[in-house]
């Protein structure tokens, strides 16, 4: 039974290979297996160092953000309204600087990603162009 559960997880990609292997190694110990399953749905393997699985966590986050979006935006507006013109300008400049720093970091990640997956990306491009070629 437990074995089938983990095979399903492979298909739904809710757990990494390492997580599945670590659970499989403990299938003889029922208590241990239970502890490794998500405490919310009880089906998927827990995310590393978490009590819930990845799907439950992202579902919760989606719901939380959706229900609190109004409040978050209201708070942001109120904070901006209470600032002086100078403070607002300073905050804007600081945010821009953070963005510029982050942009470099993101570009670095993209560059590294491209290097590591160059062949796969080129192959994808070839297949894509082939499929979308104008007749
Ligand atoms: Zn779950």
Image (cartoon, grey):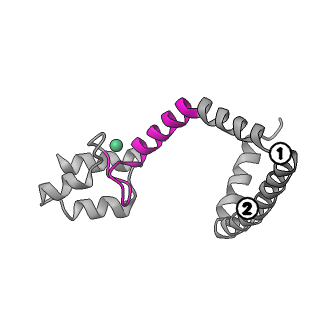
* Total marks placed: 2
Tag nearer the camera, 1 or 2: 1
Q: Residue at x 37, y 48 (%)?
A: 53
The residue closer to the viewer here, 37 or 74, is 74
Q: Is mark 2 within 8 Å of ligand 1?
A: no
Determine the quadrant in which ligand 1 lies. Answer: top left
Q: Which mark is residue 63?
A: none
**Residue 68, position as x, y percentages in the image:** 55, 33
Give the dominant element type of the magenta stretch: helix, strand or loop: helix
36 w.r.t. 112: above or below: above
Q: Is residue 19 left or right of residue 108?
A: left
**Residue 1, position as x, y percentages in the image:** 17, 46
From the image, tell me which residue sits under label 1.
84
User: Dot 2: within a 10 Å radius of its alpha carbon, few (fewer than 14), some, or many (20 or more) residues?
Assistant: few
The C terminus - image quarter: top right
Residue 63 in magenta stretch: yes
Q: CA distance from mark 1 to mark 2?
A: 27 Å
Q: Residue at x 30, y 39 (%)?
A: 41
Q: Residue at x 79, y 53 (%)?
A: 91
The residue closer to the viewer here, 67 or 81, is 81
Q: Quadrant of residue 26?
A: bottom left
41 w.r.t. 110: above or below: above
**Residue 98, position as x, y percentages in the image:** 76, 60
From the image, tell me which residue sits under label 2.
102
Q: Residue at x 75, y 40 (%)?
A: 82
Residue 50 in magenta stretch: yes
Helix, strand or loop under label 2: helix
The span shown in magenta is 44-68
Q: Is residue 64 left or right of residue 8?
A: right
């Amino acid at each position: 039974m437990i074995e089938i559960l983990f095979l399903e997880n492979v298909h739904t990609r809710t757990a990494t290979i390492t997580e599945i292997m670590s659970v499989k190694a403990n299938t003889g110990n029922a208590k241990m297996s239970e502890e490794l399953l998500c405490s919310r749905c009880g089906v998927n393997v827990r995310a590393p160092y978490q009590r819930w699985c990845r799907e439950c966590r992202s579902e919760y986050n989606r719901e939380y953000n959706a229900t609190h979006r109004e409040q978050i935006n209201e708070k942001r507006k109120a904070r901006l309204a209470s600032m002086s013109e100078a403070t607002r300008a300073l905050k804007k400049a600081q945010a821009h600087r953070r963005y510029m720093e982050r942009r470099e970091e993101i570009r670095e990640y993209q560059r590294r990603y491209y290097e590591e997956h160059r062949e796969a990306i080129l192959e994808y491009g070839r297949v894509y162009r082939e499929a979308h070629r104008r007749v």
